[in-house]
Image: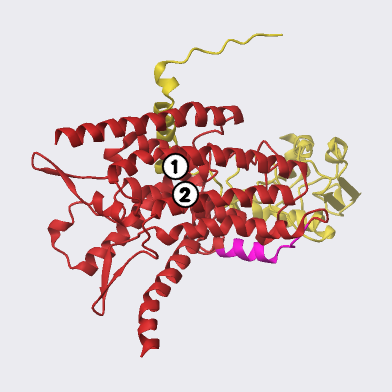
Amino acid sequence: MIGIKKPEQTLMQKIYLPEILRGLAITIRHMLRQKPVTCEYPEKPHVVPPNFRGLHRLIQRPGGRERCVACELCLTACPANCISMVAADPNDPNVEKYPLRYEIDVLRCIYCGFCEEACPCDAIELTPHYEMASSRREDFIFTKDRLLDNNRYVPEGERVSKVRTNETYLRI
Amino acid sequence: MIVPSLLLELAPVLVKIFGAFFVVLTLTAYLTLAERKFSAFIQDRIGPNRVGPFGLLQPLADGIKFIFKEDIIPTQAHKLYYILAPALLLVPALMGYAVIPFGDYVEVAGRLIPLQIADVDIGILYVLAIAGLSVYGLFMAGWASNNKYSLLGGLRSSAQMVSYELTLGLSIVGALLVYGTTNLRDIVVQQTAYWQVGSILIPKWGVFLQPLGFLLFLVSAFAESNRLPFDLPEAENELVGGYHTEYGSMKFAMFFMGEYTGMITMSALLTTFFFGGWHVPWLEAAGLSRNVAAILGVGAFCAKTGCFLFLYIWVRWTLPRFRYDQLMKLSWKGVFPLALANVFLTGVCLYLYSRLM
């Protein structure tokens, strides 16, 4: 058995009432200060930190084509196996290979950001967007077009890359 | 023409009854909102703000929710007592108002009407007796539910209520000795007098005459209305509810209303007894007409009562709950002897005063 010695109380503490008043003073201070910590979420959107990992986007080249070169590194890195891809030849002298289909199942995604890290072309990125609720399962399968469309969740200037060819960014 | 004169007699009484009923029940509803709002402010939160502006319609939404919830009566419960218990708790809480004067006389069509439902001579005894009745509601609820936790909760509550009823009564004996009457209106009238200290007039409020009595009454009132730090009957976050574990829907709401109504009664009583009821200090000098002064008085009464209600809420969100043995120790070894000492001291002082003056 462990004997715990109770701390000795001073007379003021034994009377108890002054201590109650002290407590009341603390609570009234909080009440009058009125600095609520509550986030009024739907009305006032939550401001996320700049490196927040939300919904994915596929970055575009100036022509509107995706930057992705279908190397499948993201798909390999993905611990949740939520990315699926079908690569094809685009018949474009500037582009060697491109994803014919590119799908992310965001219900499986764990938002680890490994795809973003793995990508040699900086073609995929996690945007700060996090409001993805839906009542239909299909809405959570993000196809290539939808992923390209997700560019709207980032500021205007960051949507389209300046470079056009594979060689340019493979050199970066 | 007996009917018109009877009507003339009855009309003001009925108006007062309905008025008091309406005000108290509305206040009860809004007290729940105030509780939630103030608790939020104290804890740096915002509080309910979904229903109506600043959540002002929240009590309405709560009421609708309670009414439309499924009303379950446990199969093993004693049906009659189970249904009767919430009413037995709420009704005494409401009945207490009957004798509390909320204002001076007003003059309507040449008749003087006291702003009080019933001006009875045993005022304070009536209030204490009625408050004592609510124990039956608690215990009946605990017993009729046929659930061991409810039963234990009921036992716990009754023990607390009975203990603190004693100190509640004893703590105002001193004040009663000073006032020499149990009529609440007379008590308030006595408090409208002044002491002259130099050129300053100090109102003869009970709190100055009986500071210890006030403190003891306050503590007992907290315990009697089952509020923190004495809310052992409910103890929602460490014990299985209490006497109302098996209750739901509107019956639970009635227990809830009973608690809040009890708070209002106690606050009104504290105001009447120790803070001069409807008395606004130094207002006599302004020379207002009777009706205006009376209406101001009602405002003052409401403001004072409101302050105590706020104190209730403020204390609730400041102090942790007492342990059960601490609760009993405070009652029997703390408040009770002090109340007795207060009675003794008051008696000695009054005797000396009457001898010397």
Q: Earlier in the sequence, mark 1 or mark 2?
A: 2
Mark 2 belongs to chain: B
Which residue is painted at 51% across and 29% down in the image? Answer: B332
Say which mark, if any, is on residue B251.
none
Q: Amino acid at mark 2?
A: Leu
User: What is the chain letter for disc 1?
Assistant: B
Q: Is residue B290 magenta?
A: no
Spatial separation of the CA atoms under disc 1 and disc 2: 7 Å
Image position of B130 (left or right of B75): left
Circles 1 and 2 on the same subunit: yes
Q: Quadrant of the N terminus of chain B?
A: bottom left
x and y percent of residue B190 in the render? 24, 51
- What residue is rendered at 17% in x and 52% in y? B282
Considering every residue shown, the one lying at the far front of the view is B355
In this picture, residue B215 sits left or right of residue B319: left
- Element under disc 1: helix
Q: Residue furthest left?
A: B199
Chain appearing in red on the rendered image: B
Q: Which residue is mark 1?
A: B169
Give the vertical position of A125 relative to A26 (above or below).
below
In the image, taking residue B130 as reference, residue A46 lies left or right, namely right
Q: Which residues are magenta?
A: B60-73
Within 10 Å of disc 2 (Cα), the crowding (few <14, some 14-19, many 20+) is some
Which quadrant holds residue A111? top right
CB contact under 8 Å: marks 1 and 2: yes
Q: Which chain is yellow?
A: A
Please tell me whether the stretch drawn in magenta is mainly helix, strand or loop.
helix
